[in-house]
Amino acid sequence: MDIDRVMQRLNPAVAWLLRSPMHRLLDWGLMLVTVTGRRSGRVYTIPVGYQRDGDALVVLVSKPSRKQWWRNYRDRRPIGVWLRGRAMRGHAVVVAPGSPAFRDAVERTLRQVPGLGRIPVLGWLFKSREISTDGQELIVIITPTVLPMSVATAR
């Protein structure tokens, strides 16, 4: 079973749930990112997993060759985030695999993840204790700021 294909089919339902009053069911580990294509200008919103690291949000992009959104952040660029029922804007950038910043982010993320493997049904997604540094995974660092309520509700 290809988990990426399954998740792609579930994305609309997950996005709906994250925007709903029931967002607490999923927002402990999922958020929505709104990406504007750097060449196409197309705007789209997708759910992604995240970990907090101080004021930053760390997104692990598994199997990046199969995904497109992260390519917009090879250079630091604006990004929209819907996190815990709140709209935010910020900047995101890909951290190069193998770099000291990548290794530091992986280490901090793995320290936060251990209990997730025990979650019923979804826990098997988090069983791995290692993240590859050979290009099989990427990390995107997002530094968001909360939008004023008038801007957030206008969406």
Image (cartoon, helix red, strand yellow):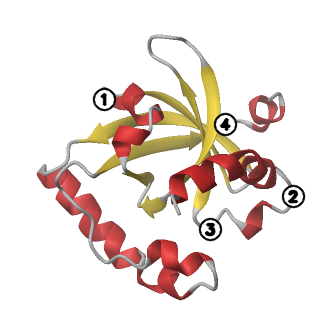
The x and y percentages for residue 78 are: 48, 27
Residue 31 visible somewhere in the drawing: no
Kindly identify which residue carries mark 3.
Answer: 28
Q: Residue at x 60, y 75 (%)?
A: 122
The x and y percentages for residue 113 are: 42, 76
Q: Tell me the amino acid under the disc marked 2.
A: Pro
Looking at the rendered structure, the secondary structure element under dot 2 is loop
Image vertical order of residue 98 relative to residue 41, above or below = below
Identify the mark at residue 40; answer none if there is no mark. Answer: none
Q: Nearer the viewer, residue 24 or 125?
A: 125
Q: Tell me the amino acid under the disc marked 3.
A: Trp
Identify the mark at residue 74; answer none if there is no mark. Answer: 1
4 or 2: mark nearer the eye: 2
- Specify few, some or many for label 4: CA neighbours under 10 Å numbering under 14, 14-19, or 20 or more: some
Q: Earlier in the sequence, mark 4 or mark 3?
A: 3
Q: Earlier in the sequence, mark 1 or mark 3?
A: 3
- Specify few, some or many for label 3: CA neighbours under 10 Å numbering under 14, 14-19, or 20 or more: few
Q: Earlier in the sequence, mark 3 or mark 2?
A: 2
Say if mark 3 contacts mark 2, CB within 8 Å: no
